[in-house]
Amino acid sequence: MLAPRFDDASFARGRPRGTARHPRAEPTAGPHRGAPALLGLGLALVTLGASGCATATTHTSIGELEVVTLREEHANVHLVRGPRGSFLVDAGLPGSAARIEARLLELEVDPAALRAVVLTHGHADHAGGAPHLRERHGVTLVAGRGDEGMLAEGRNGELCPTGRRARRRLEGDRAARFPTFAADVWIAEETPLEPLVGVPGRVRVLPGHTPGSLVLLVGRAAFVGDLFRGAIVGRSAETHFYMCDLEDNRADVRALLDAAPEVEVFFTGHFGPVTREAVEAWLDEAS
Ligand SMILES: [Zn+2]
């Protein structure tokens, strides 16, 4: 899949920062540069010439946190760096695990020092790389209890395509396999995040995309996995490629917006991130 047209973002209230790199595509190139574009409530994105990069790195500052989104193929792995350590949200495909590991080292993050890997759900492109990180570095794996069976089987569960793109991928995604594993910590109800990863916040259980899907709420940020996705090109929020009950999905997103009015930016499992305004616009359009 194509990468979106921007690969560096800052939500530091109109103060774009950071650079984007494509470590393997252009190992010796300097940082890409682009003109900042204001988006909604003073949020700023730096638009960069990233089209065609299967791999991209996005840096986003949110208060005292830095989120580094590592895109491998079409799946996002989010490195969240806080004052008391770092953790990952999702782990990518099994075949991406060694590259994610290398990219962490490039960022001077010791994988063994990660507080945990929190899996938003048990699909291959989010959970598949997790066993590698635990086997090699002893990282604690956290997942939703409802996805225990999926992880034990090492395969995606029921997949309901929502459009042509997913229908074309359906057979491959149904056939996908990943190493079977059990999480070290299972989340079955709303849980404080700080004891798990050292950052204040909460983990909510939000079944729908899978039975054990989780959403992490961390200050002004939410990590939503595949509750919805970012656009392939542009900055809108979109219905995810796979969702069995669209009405229920949108009701869940509305309820999440209401329950977490402090959240301004949503980190998605694919493409993104997207702003609250973009999520509201998608809901309005879909209703
Ligand atoms: Zn998924």
Image (tube, rainbow, N blue to C red):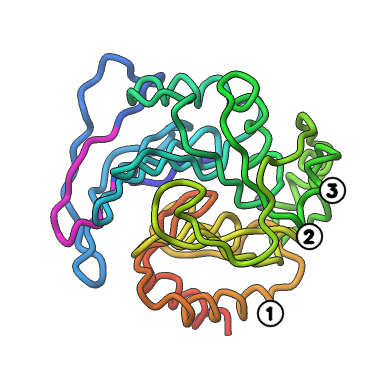
Give the x, y percent position of residue 28: 27, 14
Of marks 1 and 3, which one's residue comes earlier in the chain? 3
Tag 1, which secondary structure?
Answer: helix
The residue that appears at 51% across and 45% down in the rendered structure is 89
Q: Residue at left 65%, top 40%?
A: 125
Q: Return the x and y of residue 27 as percentages of the image width and height.
A: 32, 16
Q: Is residue 62 left or right of residue 126?
A: left
**Callout 1, which amino acid?**
Glu
Q: Is residue 120 magenta?
A: no
Residue holding disc 2: 160
Residue appearing at x 41%, y 55% in the figure: 273
Q: Amino acid at mark 2?
A: Cys
Q: Is residue 241 visible?
A: yes
Q: Few, some or many C-alpha atoms within 10 Å of disc 1 (few <14, some 14-19, many ≥20)?
A: few
Give the residue pinned by disc 1.
247
**Some atom of ligand 1 lies within 8 Å of the CB belonging to the residue at label 2:** no
Q: Earlier in the sequence, mark 2 or mark 1?
A: 2
The quadrant holding residue 127 is: top right
Q: Is residue 160 left or right of residue 274?
A: right
Q: In this figure, which residue is indicated by the disc labeled 3?
A: 149
Q: In front: mark 2 or mark 3?
A: 3
Comparing 280 with 77, the one in front is 77
| Residue under the point 48% across and 32% down | 54
Q: Are marks 2 and 3 in contact (CB under 8 Å)?
A: no
Which amino acid, mark 3?
Gly
CA gap, disc 2 and disc 3: 18 Å
Residue lying farthest to the top in this orientation? 28
| Magenta part of the chain | 9-20
Q: Residues within 10 Å of mark 3 (few under 14, many from 20)?
A: some
Residue 165 shows in this picture: no
